[in-house]
Image (cartoon, rainbow, N blue to C red):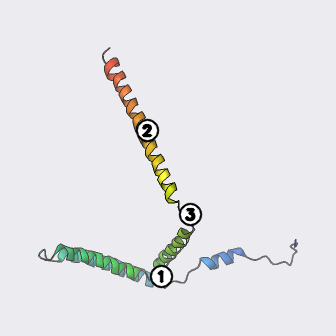
Amino acid sequence: MRELGANTEVPDTKKIMNAKAETIGTGKATDTGLLTLAALIIVAGVAAYYMLPTTIAPIVHTLCVVGAIIVACAVAWFTTPGRSVRGYLRETQFEMRKVVWPTREETVRTTLVVILVVVLLSVVLGLIDIFLKWAILDHLLKL
């Protein structure tokens, strides 16, 4: 094992970790502008929903709002928060590959056990309810 002397340089792990955490963004002003634009697009879609005449099919009203939300999400996708959402989704997808899913047989067995426990507890609670009703209404209140 190597001993650390007075002249031994220790790597600064904080710098390495911070370098990994830093992301290159489009700029705070640009992000603010794009997110404001996305919000205005949604407001425009909702306004269009209410301002379109009632003679137009209701599906067109709904499509205005849905289309505005889709366009707003597309605009927001290119901001720093949008990039972090993409990174989160990528990491989530990677973690989902690691999941060991139960077999069909295990799932069926577990489901049957849950159903059995629910039925048994329902019967037990029903019997307790009947006993308490009998004890309180038929005996205690008639004293």
Report the mark closest to the observer, 1 or 3: 3
Residue designated by label 1:
28
Residue designated by label 2:
121
Of residues 88 and 113, the one nearer the viewer is 113
Going by the numbered disc 2, the residue's amino acid type is Leu
Q: How many marks?
A: 3
Going by the numbered disc 3, the residue's amino acid type is Val
Label 2 to label 1: alpha-carbon separation: 57 Å
Instruction: Identify the secondary structure beneath mark 1.
Output: helix
Report the mark closest to the observer, 2 or 1: 2
Lower position in the chain sequence, tag 2 or tag 1: 1
Q: In this picture, is 112 found above or below 48?
A: above
- Is disc 1 in contact with disc 3, using a CB cutoff of under 8 Å? no
Relative horizontal placement of residue 50, taking residue 84 as reference (left or right): left
- Residue at 43% x, 46% y: name it: 115
Instruction: Tell me the quarter of the picture where residue 76 sits.
Output: bottom left
Residue designated by label 3:
100
Q: Residue furthest top?
A: 143
Going by the numbered disc 1, the residue's amino acid type is Lys
Of residues 130 and 82, the one nearer the viewer is 130
Instruction: Tell me the quarter of the picture where residue 1 sits.
Output: bottom right
- Residue at 47% x, 82% y: name it: 28
Of residues 113 and 98, the one nearer the viewer is 113
Crowd tier of the residue under label 3, counting other residues whose Cα lies within 10 Å: few below 14, some 14–19, many 20 or above: few
Instruction: Identify the secondary structure beneath mark 3.
Output: loop
Label 2 to label 3: alpha-carbon separation: 31 Å
- In the rendered view of the protein, which quadrant contains the C terminus? top left
